[in-house]
Image (cartoon, rainbow, N blue to C red):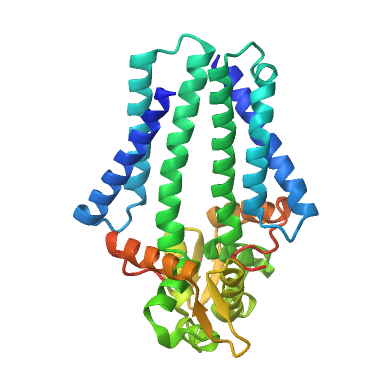
Amino acid sequence: MIAKIAIAAAAMLLAQVLIVAVLAAVQRHVSIYMTIIGVSIATAPVVFILGRFLVGQNLSIMARIYLMLVDLALGGFLFHFMTLPDRSVTLRILVELLVAPSQTLTVDALKHRYSVRSMIESRLVQLSAGAFIDISPERVITLKEKGVWFGRFVTGGRRLFRITSAN
Amino acid sequence: MIRLALPLCGIVFFFLLSLATVRLLRPRQPKSYFVSYAILLLIVSAWIYISIWGVTTLDDALGLTACMLVQALMCLTMWNSFYSLLWGFSGGLMHDLLNDPSVRHVDCLVRLYDTEVGLDRILARRLPNLDRGGYIGFRNGVLQLRPKGRLIAFGTWCSFKVFSLGMGGGTK
């Protein structure tokens, strides 16, 4: 019983990973997160219909719903996993070292490869695309309603969890 | 469907335990507490599920799997929100932009984070952490990848390639 579920879960995850990888390669302008959400939602009804084949025996409606939830949860894990390579500054630093000659860099060389300006400007462009802020041609930043909400969430959360050392 | 109330209760307890830990115990590294709570609550939920409904059929086993995965996902979502949003770079930018109107210009914001010499505000927190964690060696301004860091970096680099993420790190 456990083996059947484990194999079904592995198959569902593998299918989602493969579909997301192919779509990400084909549609580079689309957010990887939207792709993951889309694939997860799109595969859920397929899992509901093909549940019998996935676990190798007939399933009740409730069991198919559970299987669908497993598929959606696996998509959620893939979503969280993707935030690591895609967003993490720390992991980017490690990769910069990996691809550097002798896997060694001075701080100045690291700052040259992955500069604060490029980091900030890239994030600001993404925040602007996400309608959190607006950047004028004079490079003045204006917070939009969504940005104010996000800023308040971070400020309130840091106060709640007593975070003082984050950047 | 009532079985799905179990992971919902689990996540409420996870939040309350995490909040109490951070506010009362104030650990320097709350990560280990969060992991412990998540694992403990998963065990408790599984025990309650098995005690009430048992696991005699495939339907029961699927229900248990779904409940455990949903609970683990919600704990991870909360944990990720804590670290990625509250500690993360984008969250930090939005925090600064909201609370300090004088940095609402791209160049002013860059100046706030950058330094001419030495470690800037972004590297100052990360490099010592990576050194302490054994991922890199950091001596006299020179960084060298260690085996543990090499493994993580290689996995990350593979993800860049498989999912067409460019060079990651929040840059496109």
Residue at 62% over, 80% down: A112
Q: Is residue A126 visible?
A: yes
Q: Quadrant of residue B14?
A: top left
The residue furthest top is B56
Residue at 60% over, 56% down: A85
Residue A157 at x, y percent in the picture: 34, 61
Residue B53 at x, y percent in the picture: 39, 14
The residue furthest left is B24
Q: Is residue A49 above or below residue A94?
A: above
Viewer-proximal residue, A145 or A8? A145
Q: Is residue A41 above or below residue A10?
A: below
Q: How many marks?
A: 0
The residue furthest right is A26
Q: Is residue B128 visible?
A: no
The quarter of the rendered structure image containing the C terminus of chain A is bottom left
Q: Quadrant of residue A137?
A: bottom right
The quarter of the rendered structure image containing the N terminus of chain A is top right
Residue at 61% over, 58% down: A86
Residue B131 at x, y percent in the picture: 45, 64
Residue at 43% over, 70% down: A148
Residue B110 at x, y percent in the picture: 52, 84
Viewer-proximal residue, B148 or A83? A83
Viewer-proximal residue, B116 or B8? B8
B56 lies left or right of A122: left
